[in-house]
Image: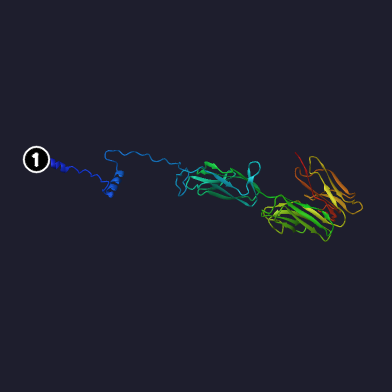
Amino acid sequence: MRTAVFAAVLGLVVALPAAPAAADEGTGSSTATTTKQDAKRAQPGAGVAPKTVAPPKPTVSPKPAAPKVGVPKQRSALAAWQLTLNVPGAHDNGEGAQVSWLWITQSFHITATANQDVGPTPYYIRIYRDDVQIAICGTGTTCSVDVGSSVIASSWISADISTAAGSRIVASNPPFVLVDWHFTTVSLNVAQTTVNVGSAATLTARTFFDVGPSPFWTQIFDLTTGTRVAICGSGESCPVNITQASATTHRYQAFVGYNSATLPLSGPQSSSLVNWVTWSNSGFRISLTAPVYTETTETVTATASSSVTPTPWYIEIFDADTGTRIAFCGNGSVCSLTGYTPPVPNVRTHLVAFVSSFSTAFPPSGIQATSNLVETMHYVP
């Protein structure tokens, strides 16, 4: 019986699985140990339920628009955003606003610069003109655009960093710059409207702005002959001396525009009033006065340097805009028109006087002297 029991116990022991041998830390196999550790990490211990681990929360919500190509949807931790707006020539106007001026047909190269690359983020750099987006950049630290105007205009330029949906993260510094595309006015001054034959008459065209930084030129034309007598590429003043070898009267006008030896000029331009210059040895000189504006009627007066009574000449006053003669006198040295009303209310009328033959033509024949040009207006509130 002992033999039978011993055999049964021995059979039971043999049938049991062998227990895993513990690795010897000093002499055990590192390969075996690594394999076991890997297996342990791969499978939880028998009879123990694995822990449930929540997925990490994204640091940035997904963009509502399509993500940038090749850019992660999540952004890493970044410092506070800053954006600088650069408009060439921008300066403080003394009232706390940034302004910049440029000639029409020229462009501002505007740049918005961020302190960090927007590429790895869901943000964009945007530039606006009068709140209308004109540039958008999704990578890098800068965003640029050229902005110009072919006509006189003013616009507010701004920039920001914003989401794809347009939600602003930070505004630019400065937040706005007023850009102004300007042209210029031009006037023509004649030092003496009547000079002796062979003497020089000095004509000076003056502009409000220096034309040097512009693509335009100040030019003076002799309208009587159709020739250009002066051209200046810089400055606010363009003078010229003109002489004539015989008795004559010429009309002159100043322009600002592209360089051209003939009229009409092409492209943007500004022009002065037409002025007359007479070369004569008659000895006569004449001047003209009229109020700058009136709300009723006015008096226009032409004064000659001497009486026309003993001569065949007359003092005549003309509306230079319409060519209509409005007064004439055959005696004395003063010719006044009282009760005169400029023809179009609130519009400037230009007048000029002559010592000349009796004539309704404009300009009259036989001109001996020419006056200055005057502006007057009938003001109606």
Q: Is residue 16 left or right of residue 277?
A: left
Give how far across and how far down residue 182 sits, in percent.
Answer: 67, 49
Residue 310 locus on image (x, y percent): 92, 53
Q: Is residue 355 left or right of residue 46?
A: right
Where does the image place residue 130, in percent across and percent down from the top left? Answer: 60, 44
| In the image: residue 57, left or right of residue 268 | left
- The residue furthest front is 26
Name the residue at the left extreme: 1
Task: From the viewer's perspective, tell me whether residue 44 is left or right of residue 119.
Answer: left
Q: Nearer the viewer, residue 6 or 363?
A: 6
Q: How is the image coloured?
A: rainbow
The quarter of the image holding the N terminus is top left
**Residue neighbourhood size for the residue with mark 1, other residues' Cα within 10 Å, grouped as few (<14), some (14–19), many (≥20):** few
Q: Is residue 249 visible?
A: no
* Residue annotated with mark 1: 4
Answer yes or no: is residue 202 visible.
yes
Residue at the location (79% across, 55% down)? 202
**Residue 343's quadrant in the figure?**
top right
The type of residue carrying mark 1 is Ala
Residue 345, placed above or below residue 200: above
* Residue 207 location (% of width, % of height): 72, 51
Q: Secondary structure at mark 1?
A: helix
Measuring 31% from the left and 44% from the top, which residue is drawn there?
Answer: 41
